C-alpha cells in the first residue's frame, strides 16, 4: 500500500490550498472590522487602498473604526490598477502590518497584489458585487498598457457590508451576475480540456452551484434589495473559494473570459468585465450545445447586456474578439479554441449576440 501511495504522490504532487480565514457578510458588518482584525491577531498599523469614490462611500468610516480601535491608518487613493500604482502602495510596506483593499476591482487588486508581493496580510472590503475578484487569488494589473492577470493570494478576510453594496449602481450588480453565471461555461471548458487541466470535481461543483443559486433566485436578485445582493455576494465569494481549491482560475474562467480579456486588451472602450463575460457565455454555451437561453434570460432579468448593441461594442469587434480569443492564454483550451470561425459566427448570430 505504501508503494502505491508513493507512486500516486509522484504523479499527483501535493498542492497547497489558501482560503480566507474569515468571511463576514450582511448589513452593517463594516463596524465589526476592529473585532475582525483582533480575531485574526493582526498587529496594529494598517494601510487602506481605495479611490476617491470608495473613500467617501466607506473608506472614511473604515479609518474611523480602525483608529478608534487603536490601529493607526495610512491611506492611498489610486486612479488605476497599474504597476506604477502598485509600486506606490508597496512603498509603505516597511511602515504597515496589514492592508485593506476597499472598493471595486482596482483598489482590491492593487492591495491584493501588494500584499502578496510584500507578504503582508490583506483584507478585502468590496463596495459592489460586480465580479468575483474580491475573494480570489488573481489580480488584474495593467503593465505597459495591457491588462495582465497576476498570481496573488486570497484575502485573509472578506468583509462584505451588503447595506453598502446594495446602494451601488444597479449596473454593477448586473455585471456581478454576468461574472457568476459564466461559471457554467467555464466549467464546461475545463472539462473539455481534459486531464491536462487538472480538473477538480469538487471545485467545479462549487462553482456551478454558485451560478445556479443566482440563476434559480434571479427575481430576488433583480429586485436590488439587500437580500438579493447578499445572495450574489455569497455566490461570488464561493466562486473565489472554488478557484482557491482548484489552485487555478479554471472553475470560473473559460472561453467567455478569454473573450473579455481580448476586448480589454484590444478595444478602446471595453464594457464591464462581468458584462463581457456574461455576453460571451451566451455564445460559448450555444457552442457547447447547452441551455444558452437560460443564461440570456438570467442576464436580461438584471438588465445586463445580451447583445452587442446593449454592450456598446460593434458586431464586427465582438465577432473578432470571439474568434481571436484563442490568442489569449493559448495554453488554456476552451470551446472557442475548438470551434471554427464559421461555427463561432453562426453561434453569435443564432443567439442574437450580433446581427
Image: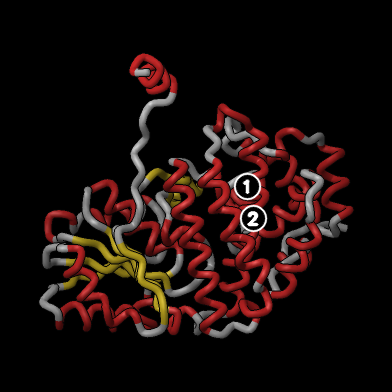
In the picture, measured across the screen, residue 11 lies left or right of residue 348, that is: left
Residue at left offset 45%, top offset 79%: 162
For marks 2 and 1, give the CA distance: 6 Å
Residue where numbered disc 2 is placed? 182
**Numbered disc total:** 2
Q: Nearer the viewer, residue 173 or 78?
A: 173
Q: Nearer the viewer, residue 159 or 278?
A: 159
Residue at left offset 47%, top offset 45%: 148
Q: Is residue 265 visible?
A: no
Residue 161, image x, y percentages:
40, 78
In the picture, measured across the screen, residue 195 lies left or right of residue 109, that is: right
* Residue 232 versus residue 259 in the image, above or below: below
Q: Are marks 2 and 1 in contact (CB under 8 Å)?
A: yes
Q: Nearer the viewer, residue 271 or 72?
A: 72
Residue 20, image x, y percentages:
34, 57
* Residue 114 versus residue 248 in the image, above or below: below
Give the image quarter of residue 292: bottom right
Q: Is residue 305 visible?
A: yes
Residue 137, image x, y percentages:
40, 50
Give the image quarter of residue 276: bottom right
Residue where numbered disc 1 is placed? 186
Amino acid at each position: 500500500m505504501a508503494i502505491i501511495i508513493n507512486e500516486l504522490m509522484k504523479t499527483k504532487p501535493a498542492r497547497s490550498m489558501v482560503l480566507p480565514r474569515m468571511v463576514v457578510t450582511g448589513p452593517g458588518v463594516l463596524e465589526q472590522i476592529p473585532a475582525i482584525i483582533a480575531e485574526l491577531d493582526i498587529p496594529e498599523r494598517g494601510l487602506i487602498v481605495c479611490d476617491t469614490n470608495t473613500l467617501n462611500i466607506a473608506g472614511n468610516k473604515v479609518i474611523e473604526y480602525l483608529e478608534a480601535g487603536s490601529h493607526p491608518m495610512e491611506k492611498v487613493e489610486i486612479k488605476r490598477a497599474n504597476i506604477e500604482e502598485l509600486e506606490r502602495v508597496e512603498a509603505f510596506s516597511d511602515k504597515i502590518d496589514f492592508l485593506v483593499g476597499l472598493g471595486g476591482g482596482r483598489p482590491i487588486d492593487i492591495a491584493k497584489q501588494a500584499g502578496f508581493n510584500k507578504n503582508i496580510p490583506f483584507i478585502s472590503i468590496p463596495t459592489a458585487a460586480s465580479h468575483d475578484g474580491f475573494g480570489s487569488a488573481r489580480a488584474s494589473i495593467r503593465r505597459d498598457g495591457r491588462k495582465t492577470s497576476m498570481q496573488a493570494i486570497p484575502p485573509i478576510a472578506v468583509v462584505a457590508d451588503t447595506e453598502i453594496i446594495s446602494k451601488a449602481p444597479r449596473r454593477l450588480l448586473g455585471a456581478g451576475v454576468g461574472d457568476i453565471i459564466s461559471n457554467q461555461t467555464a466549467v464546461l471548458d475545463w472539462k473539455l480540456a481534459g486531464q491536462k487541466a487538472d480538473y477538480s470535481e469538487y471545485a467545479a461543483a462549487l462553482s456551478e452551484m454558485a451560478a445556479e443559486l443566482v440563476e434559480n433566485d434571479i427575481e430576488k436578485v433583480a429586485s436590488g434589495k439587500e437580500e438579493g445582493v447578499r445572495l450574489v455576494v455569497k455566490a461570488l465569494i464561493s466562486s473565489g473559494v472554488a478557484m482557491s481549491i482548484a489552485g487555478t482560475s479554471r472553475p470560473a474562467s473559460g472561453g467567455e473570459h478569454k473573450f473579455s480579456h481580448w476586448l480589454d486588451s484590444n478595444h478602446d472602450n471595453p464594457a464591464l468585465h462581468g458584462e463581457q463575460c456574461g455576453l460571451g457565455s451566451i455564445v460559448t454555451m450555444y457552442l457547447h450545445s447547452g441551455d444558452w437561453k437560460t443564461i440570456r434570460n438570467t442576464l436580461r432579468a438584471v438588465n445586463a447586456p445580451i447583445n452587442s448593441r446593449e454592450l456598446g461594442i460593434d458586431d464586427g469587434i465582438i465577432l473578432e474578439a470571439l474568434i481571436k480569443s484563442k490568442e489569449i492564454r493559448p495554453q488554456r483550451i476552451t470551446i472557442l479554441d475548438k470551434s471554427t470561425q464559421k461555427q463561432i459566427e453562426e453561434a453569435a448570430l443564432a443567439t442574437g449576440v450580433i446581427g
